[in-house]
Amino acid sequence: MHIRSTRRNFLQQSTFAATGCLLPWSSAAASADTVDGPRSLRTHAQTHGLLSGCAVVAERLADEPTYADTVAQQANLLVAENAMKWRALRPAADKYNFTQADAILAFADAHGQRLRGHNLCWHEALPEWFQSTATRENARRLLTDHIQHVAGHFAGKLHSWDVVNEAIDVKDGRPDGLRKSPWLELVGPDYIEIAFRAARMADSTALLTYNDYGIELDTPEQEQKRARVLELVQRLKLKGVPIHAVGVQSHLTAGDGVPGAGLRDFIREVGALGLQVFITELDVSDHNLAGSTVERDTAVAKLYGDYLGLVLKEPNVTAILTWGITDKYTWLNHEHARRDGQPQRCLPFDAEYKPTPVFFAMRSAYDSHSQTQPSLGS
Ligand code: 9MR
């Protein structure tokens, strides 16, 4: 008899289950009109077998109590927005600095949260010394040494690692879709499997993830990119490369269309390979939306709700992270600033830490999702 995979099956198959899981989180009883404690995203996600959280910045966790409290209350999974990238960890070719990354891990541990590592291999956020130091002769060694050292430093402590980030760029014209990144140019196309194998050697428990963006919509461009990502993951699996999950970044834009059957089918194909899917960097830019704050909020929250409604129907989707917790610090104000100068409203909390319609759309997506799932048993 074919037994449909449930989210819990996926979690049990994963090393996540083997390495210890969510610590129970409790808080003083919250009143019905609050959004913390039993009414937080964290508790609603956990109740329905999901991990839910956000990207964080260590300095803010240390210096801004409202930021830290909101992250502690709302997330059971964190990821470092920048602190675990090469540029942050490698001030010099022969130096590692784990201060900020370790602070985030300590915060997560103190609050019973899991932590994702982001990322071990990317074409961006490389330190300045990289360009003058990396050559075809030493690049493979640079990559494996970095992974050995960094993944080794956190071994046994992380939920997952984005091992390779954004390796596909169809515009670069290669039949395999690989981006002409420094890693491709210096190491060759095998750099991806080299990175995954090195990560496995260094940490035998973190779920090893391939993470990419621009694979959510049913536009011809995104369909092509999604196909190349799927082929890459299939190739890796066929070669026995240790990979456990695909990260769908999910930087969406209100007004650009709503993800649909293409993404759903992709998630299923990834699931058929035995892999989980994490929604790793969810946010909705409203830079194309005119209208009042209420109209903008309604459109942004609707896209969140529609999107989570779609992806959460798939049992191998086990984790949802937004790229930040408060509009106060969103990267979108720098990269996709609104022409009218208004700040973006793209995350579950606004710049004053008040819950936005996005918060409620997320929470009800977590709740309604449980009603569509088969009974998970004990
Ligand atoms: O939000 C991040 C921003 O602060 C950094 O300057 C930038 C470069 O390191 O990276 C941003 O995060 C990116 C993430 O690491 C990968 N996916 C796209 C994210 C937004 O650009």
Image (tube, rainbow, N blue to C red):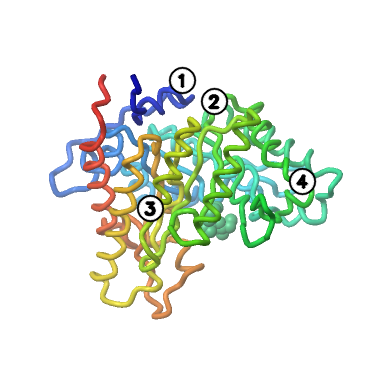
Label 1 vs 3, first from the N-terminus: 1
Answer whether labels 1 and 3 touch (C-beta < 8 Å). Answer: no
Relative to 375, say whether 162 is above or below: below
Q: CA distance from mark 2 to mark 1?
A: 8 Å
Q: For residue 298, which numbered disc appears in the image? A: none
Question: Residue under circle 4?
Answer: 188
Q: Quadrant of the N terminus?
A: top left
Specify whether 197 is left or right of 306.
right
Give the residue displayed 45% in from the left and 72% down from the top: 337
Cβ–Cβ below 8 Å for labels 2 and 1? Answer: yes
Report crowding for label 2: few under 14, some 14 to 19, many 20 or more residues within 10 A (C-alpha). Answer: many
- Location of residue 301 by image quarter: bottom left
Q: Quadrant of the C terminus?
A: top left
| Numbered mark located on residue 205 in the image | 2
> What residue type is disc 1 on?
Ala
Residue 239: image x %, image y %? 65, 31
Do we see residue 103 in this rendering? yes
Q: Give the left or right position of residue 360, taking residue 100 as reference.
A: left
Distance in Å between CA atoms under marks 1 and 4: 35 Å
Among numbered discs 2 and 3, the one appearing first in the sequence: 2
**Badge nearest the viewer, 2 or 3:** 2
Please provide percent x and percent y for residue 7: 35, 31
Q: Amino acid at mark 4?
A: Gly
Instruction: Say which residue label 3 marks.
Output: 325
Q: Residue furthest right?
A: 137
Q: CA distance from mark 4 to mark 2?
A: 27 Å
Report, in whole angstroms, how far the alpha carbon at label 4 lies from the one at label 3. Answer: 37 Å
The answer to whether residue 63 shows anywhere in this view is no
Q: Which label sits on residue 18?
A: 1
What is the crowding at mark 4: few (fewer than 14 residues within 10 Å), some, or many (at least 20)? some
Q: Amino acid at mark 3?
A: Ile
